[in-house]
Image (cartoon, rainbow, N blue to C red):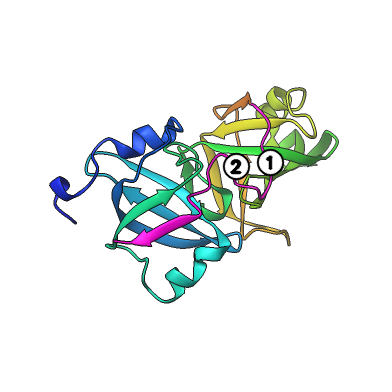
Amino acid sequence: MAAAAELSRGAVAAMSRMEQGLRPVLQVTDVRPAAGRYLVALFDGTKSGQGVLVASMAHLVRARAIRAGTIIRVLDYLCIDTSLTPIAALSPYKCKWTIKARVTAKSGLQHLSNDRGEAKFFDFDLLDEQGGEMLAKCFSSAAEKFYGLIEVDKVYLISRGLVKPAQEPFNSDYELALDASASVEGSSPVHAASGANQRLSRAISAH
């Protein structure tokens, strides 16, 4: 990792507050595909953040000019996020990072019966700002807790769910299972695929 003295300490926090006029030197710590673009994790010597590289800069990743370990100077950006996890970046684990997504569809409340008794169930589709999609499922007490809260076209912050391989065909390899311990909170609108609040800059260059 680059010496902290070479990096613009405090820049990630400043970028997350949407401060303008910055030209920080940061280190790329991870690059991965995300809904047709690239999710870039950056470190300023003290704090990490992430954003989505605009499509016009994707050739720099393919040419390995931007990769893990690269030192870059950010010339322009909209915002860098330090808390939200894009759906496309999720892998199977207990979800402690928060997902912000819009509900695009919701099933009715269903009553299931098996050898263990009766249970309630519903599911809903999620779409985040990067265009990532995921199916969320709620059973039993979670179905009772969240069915009245979840509304189509509303935006929610969701955490403490279990991310696991999808059991049925969908636009994601994974699905989100919520139990009664999950957190679901209403939030401000999300603009799918526009990346307006989490997109990294239009002009990022190798330093």
Residue sitting nearer the eye, 61 or 158: 61
- Left or right placement of residue 168 versus residue 7 in this view: right
Count residues near mark 1 (Cα–Cα under 10 Å), then give few for <14, some for 14-19, many for 20+.
some
Front residue of 172 and 35: 35
Q: Which residue is mark 2?
A: 196
Residue 126 location, quadrant: top right
**Segment tinted magenta in the rendering:** 188-207
Estimate how packed mark 2 is, as few (under 14), some (14 to 19) or many (20 or more) residues with alpha carbons within 10 Å: some
**Residue annotated with mark 1:** 191
Q: Residue 14 vs residue 133: left or right?
A: left
**Does the image show residue 49?**
yes
For image coordinates 74% across by 38% down, the residue present is 103
Q: Position of residue 96 (x, y in %)?
A: 45, 37
> Could you tell which of marks 2 and 1 lies nearer the N-terminus?
1
> How far apart, in angstroms, are the residues tagged by discs 2 and 1?
7 Å
Q: Quadrant of the C terminus?
A: bottom left
Does residue 60 sit above or below 164 in this rendering?
below
> Label 1 amino acid?
His
Residue 87 against residue 121 in the figure, above or below: below
Q: Which residue is drawn at the image coordinates 65% and 58% (left, top)?
A: 172
Circles 2 and 1: CB distance less than 8 Å?
yes
Which label is found at residue 152?
none
Q: Residue at x 42, y 57 (%)?
A: 204
Q: Secondary structure at mark 1?
A: loop
Predominant secondary structure, magenta span: loop
Between circles 2 and 1, the one closer to the viewer is: 2
**Residue 14: horizontal and vertical position, in percent?**
36, 33
**Is any atom of residue 92 visible in this view?**
no
Q: Residue furthest bottom?
A: 63
Residue furthest to the front? 21
Q: Quadrant of the N terminus?
A: bottom left
